[in-house]
Image (cartoon, rainbow, N blue to C red):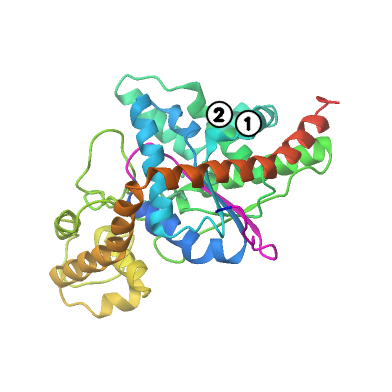
Amino acid sequence: MLGSRALGAAGPRVFSGVQPTGHLTLGNYLGAMRRWVEVDQRRGDALFCVVDLHALTVEHDPGRVRRLTRQAATLLLAAGLEPERCTVFVQSHVDEHARLSYLMECTASDGEMRRMVQYKEKVAQRAARGESVRLSLLTYPALMAADILAYGTQEVPVGADQAQHVELTRDLAVRFNQRYGETFVVPRATHPKVAERVMDLQEPTSKMGKSGQERKTGVVYVLDEAEVVRKKVMRAVTDGGSDVAYEPEERPGVANLLNVLAACTEGDPRELAGAYGSYGSLKKDTADAVVEVLRPVRERHAALAADAGYVDSVLRDGAERARAMARPRVDAAYRAVGLLA
Ligand code: AMP
Ligand code: TRP
């Protein structure tokens, strides 16, 4: 059923991933998934992965990770990724990721890992609560580099928060190639034009992110019901002043709404600002636009979630294809460092 397909052989090799650490958000959708569907799977030879090993870098509940992994994979298909056009799979189903990650740890220095902004932020948050962090949170960019480099990836479509990790991946690829001979393609990140960083509606200076267990009112989840989405957007924090202007530094709350509206309607946030006389009407239109963008995804998700056999077959087939693509390059890397015959 899924066996015959024409990969976009002429296009670039694309790889991206999403962590099953919480329910997927509007940030994930506008910053990453929507572009994977509309652009990346059509242009090239693309792989999209639910990176479940990464979900183990923070405290986790095994049953929840399993459920969220499945939900994320189902959502990728609901958003419109087509198994006939691209490869959709789960990271832990393909051993090559963990296998190459070790070689990346042997290529990176601990100093460059400790400089990662996301790591520093998470350590600071946890230290404030008197908690420790898992060692894998520090080494996580080595695993992410392995995810990308195993496939000869050229482009990595991600939100702005991942730019630094892709930059590090480039450094590791170049360093490995210099030390051991040409083995890896040096990839580059691509970002969406608008909404490369969707902010929390209640705290517009922080990224809208999946948070652990609790559901936050500043975060719109892809599977939120229309009424919930409306409420969250209508209650978004706005800034002083009452006229609508696009000033991300001075007025992050309003700029965030304009960015979201622009992303949902293919508009330009600055031009949209001129079209509104009050925060109330901007919020109402933004709420409507978000509801319309998410509606078909939620509907398809419900249909796919009822067809477990189909999702399983897509993931099984995806893992098989991914394994076949990664294996030769990871073997070559092992040989290059002096292992294997
Ligand atoms: P994560 O949820 O961290 O696994 O992210 C999966 C993808 O969504 C990555 O490409 C992120 O850069 C992107 N992403 C996550 N949150 C946001 C956000 N608030 N705005 C834009 N992109 C995001
Ligand atoms: N670290 C990414 C995030 O938090 C997820 C991820 C893991 C990823 N491996 C990747 C993204 C490889 C792109 C390519 O969003």
Q: Which quadrant holds residue 125? A: top left
Residue on which the image places disc 2: 139
324, 59: nearer the viewer: 324
Q: CA distance from mark 2 to mark 1?
A: 9 Å
217, 132: nearer the viewer: 217
Which residue sits at x=64%, y=63%?
Answer: 8
**Which tag is nearer the camera, tag 2 or tag 1?**
1
Amino acid at dot 1: Ser
Asked if one can make out residue 299 in the rendered structure from this viewpoint, the answer is yes
Residue 101 numbered mark, or none: 1
Query: What is the crowding at mark 1: few (fewer than 14 residues within 10 Å), some, or many (at least 20)?
Result: many
267, 62: nearer the viewer: 62
Which residue sits at x=66%, y=55%?
Answer: 154
- The residues colored magenta run 3-23
Would you say the residues marked 2 and 1 are in contact, meaning their CB atoms lie under 8 Å apart?
A: yes
Query: What is the crowding at mark 2: few (fewer than 14 residues within 10 Å), some, or many (at least 20)?
Result: many
Left or right side of 48 for 323: right
Q: In the picture, which quadrant includes the C terminus?
A: top right
